[in-house]
Each structure stands twice: as structure tokens, then as C-alpha cells.
Image: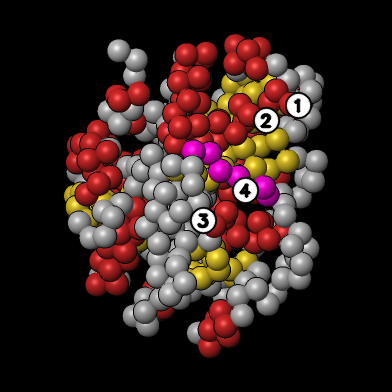
Amino acid sequence: MSAVASKLSDPLSSLSVPGQCAVLPGKDPDAQGFFGPYGGMFVPPALAPVLEELAAAYLKYRNDPEFLQEFSYYLSHYSCRPTPLFRCDNLSRSLGGAVIYLKREDLNHLGAHKINNTLGQILLAKRMNKKRIIAETGAGSHGVAAAAAAALMNMECTVYMGEEDMRRQAPNVQRMRMMGATVACVTDGQRTLKEAVDAAIGAWAADPSSFYLLGSAVGPHPYPLMVRDFQSVIGKEIRQQCLEEKGRLPDVCVACVGGGSNAIGMFHPFIEESAVRLVGVEPGGRGSGKIGDHAATMTYGVPGVVHGFNSYVLQDEKGEICPVHSISAGLDYPGVGPEHALLKDCGRVEYVTATDKEAVDAFFTLSRAEGVIPALESAHALAHALSMAPAMHKDQFIVVNLSGRGDKDLAQLEEYFPA
């Protein structure tokens, strides 16, 4: 761990000026799990050998034909991939300018992109002879996907969820329990995603024989690499679908960013395609830069360590993790995946914000224009696409990653419904 510690002492040492990287983006992390200066493995000593075992297992099976064949089977026969690319004719016509397409991850089994990653990790857990799954969730989509994957593989599953998120996402709590998972209520702090991750890591440290099925492209190595690989099916399908339908790649790809799994899954196959503009949309919350009013880590954060990895983090001058806010339970996290941090510093991906109001407006705009109800997380990405399209040429097109469906958010949105 000494080499890891030395990298952390100067977290920007491997970068030159913004927009120029000493480490090429889009590549695998180094042997210690660093994407440039970001990533690594900052964990209690008891978990270090567990992570090393996990990393070795993943590297063993990552390109194993039998593993990949089984993963492909469940993606197609269980999750119903490939998900379609949908052209929003009504919406695009009303905006003028670029045409907007949706990558319909909401049509995955269980209604979100999360199942891509949980299927990959559960198949790895099976090969490691694990019998118990530990997971965390914010909006509940990952918890539901983890519960389903555990049921599929006949494994015990405990999902940690903040009390506030359990209130906001009650239907997903019911779905997890229906599939046999135990939902552990976390009452610490803000009672949201950050605290759920804290609790899940604590439970994992107490039972290292279990398998921690992490839901986003965050955490200690090898999780950011694994989640990126499993979610990159999104970008690979977009690439193929655009070539088949349009004969070329998209002008812009847009995705929401909390921890960043749906975004890195979309972006990764396009990193080396300089003509494709990549935009990540963070939760701007109430619209101010004040602590506690947003969860825009890339916009307001600084390099630091959270949950076992080094990345951009929302922290105060004392290094304490800041409270965060977003109308979307899946985006209110004070860190971001380490590969996103490198992509920001390199300038390969643009990171912007959308406020709660802008996300809600986009939610209703899409619902009424196309009859597609997006998750509030996805509505952040859509909001930015709606602002971009009118200024672009009609021959151009934008692909928005519709990472989930919005039925989970309906109770929370009741106050916005017209009388």
C-alpha cells in the first residue's frame, strides 16, 4: 500500500495542464487501480486481501470466453438486451435543431441500467463461491437489480438504504423485499446514499467472506473497472445502432452523473472518437453553489478520498464530507467515479449541471411529448439535451442515455402535478 499512499500525497502529480493528460483517458487503470492520480485502494487492512482476491478473480474471468458467453446470455434472455435507440420525433420537431434520440435503458428488466452491472458481478461472485451478497442503494434501482440477481443465483442478499431514500423510493423497497432481499434501514447522517455506502462497507468489513456488489463506478479497485466494463454494453450498442440507422456516430452523447456508472458505460466506447462530444450532467439541486444545495461533485469538488478511492469529492476546508442535495435519490452522492475525474481533467468530457426544477421540467416535457416517463436521474441529462438541441443543426443528433424509468419517482413528483 506504500505506493498508493505516495500517489495520494500529491493527487495531481501525474497531470500537466487542464486538457492535457500524462495518462491517456479511456484505458484501464494501472496495477494499483489508478486512473492517472485517481482511484486506488484506500481501505482498512482487513479488506485489502479481500479486494486483492476480487481483483485477481476479475482479471482471471474478464476475458474468459465461458464467462462472457454466460454474461451475454443473461443480458439478452434475462434483461432483454439490446435496448432500443428511440428517435423522439415530436420532441425534436418542437425544439428545432438537432434530433434527440433516447437509449432506452428504462426498457431493461426492472427498469434501469443497473441490471447490466449486477448480472456481471453476480456471475463473478458465483465463480468465487460466494453465498451472501451485500449491496447499497440510493434510488433503489441498484438494490432491486442486486436483489433480482441474488434471487436468480440463489444467494442471500442484504441491501443497505438510507431512511430518507426508503421514504422517497418506497415502491423499490417493496420490490426488493418481494424478491427475498433484506433491506437494512440506515439512520445516520442525511440518511441517504453516502450513509448507505458507509453501512454496506462496514457490513462487508465485518463479513469479508461475503461479496460486496457495488452499484456505481466508484469505490476501491477493482470496482470502477468492473462496473465500467459491465456497463459499457450501453455505449457499444449505441455505437452499433447509430451506424446502422444513421451511418455515422452521434454528434453528442449525454448522460447524468452521480457516481457515474450509466455515464461511463455510455462514454467509454467513444473516448477515442474525438468527433463525438461527451457531456455528463450533474445534479445542480436548488441552483446555488452553497454547501448542501447540490451534489455537483465535478463542478464544486476537490480531490480527496471517500469510500476507499481518490477522486473529486465535495468536502469542506477541514476535509469533512459535505451534505448534498438532489431531487433525485440516485444522484445525491458527494463523490464521483475516478475515471470521470480523469476525463474531466483531460477535458475529454464536459461536466455541467441541471437543477431540480430543470430536471422536473424535462421529466414532464418528455412524458407529454413522447409518452415516455423518465427517471428523475435521467431527466437531468435530458434537461441539458433540451437546451442544446435548438442551437444545433438539423442534420446533427444527440443521444441521451435514458438510464431508468420514472414510475419509482411518481409519489415524489405529486406536488408538481397540475390539479
Q: Give the CA distance from mark 3 to mark 4.
A: 10 Å
**Residue 368 vertical position relative to residue 334 in the rendered view, above or below:** above
Q: Give the CA distance from mark 1 to mark 4.
A: 19 Å
Badge 1 crowding class, 10 Å Cα cut-off, few under 14, some 14 to 19, many 20 or more, is: some
Q: Name the secondary structure under disc 4.
A: strand
Badge 3 crowding class, 10 Å Cα cut-off, few under 14, some 14 to 19, many 20 or more, is: many
Which of the marked residues, 2 or 4, is nearer the chain's N terminus? 4
How far across and down, in percent of the image, does residue 32 sit? Answer: 57, 75
Return the residue at label 3. 297
**Residue 341 vertical position relative to residue 309 in the rendered view, above or below:** above
Say whether marks 2 and 4 touch (CB < 8 Å): no
Q: Which mark is residue 392?
A: 1
Q: Give the CA distance from mark 3 to mark 1.
A: 28 Å
Relative to residue 59, is residue 151 drawn left or right?
Answer: left
Which of the marked residues, 1 or 4, is nearer the chain's N terminus? 4
Q: Name the secondary structure under disc 3.
A: helix
Q: Tell me which amino acid carries mark 3.
A: Thr
Q: Name the secondary structure under disc 2.
A: helix
User: Is residue 338 highlighted in magenta?
Assistant: no
Return the residue at label 2. 388
How far across and down, in percent of the image, does residue 12 sit? Answer: 65, 73
> Which portion, as a residue range, is magenta?
349-355
Q: Is residue 265 visible?
A: no
Q: Name the secondary structure under disc 1.
A: loop
Return the residue at label 4. 351
Q: Nearer the viewer, residue 227 or 252?
A: 252
Which residue is located at x 46 percent, y 53 percent? 290
Q: Tell me which amino acid carries mark 4.
A: Tyr
Say whether marks 3 and 1 touch (CB < 8 Å): no
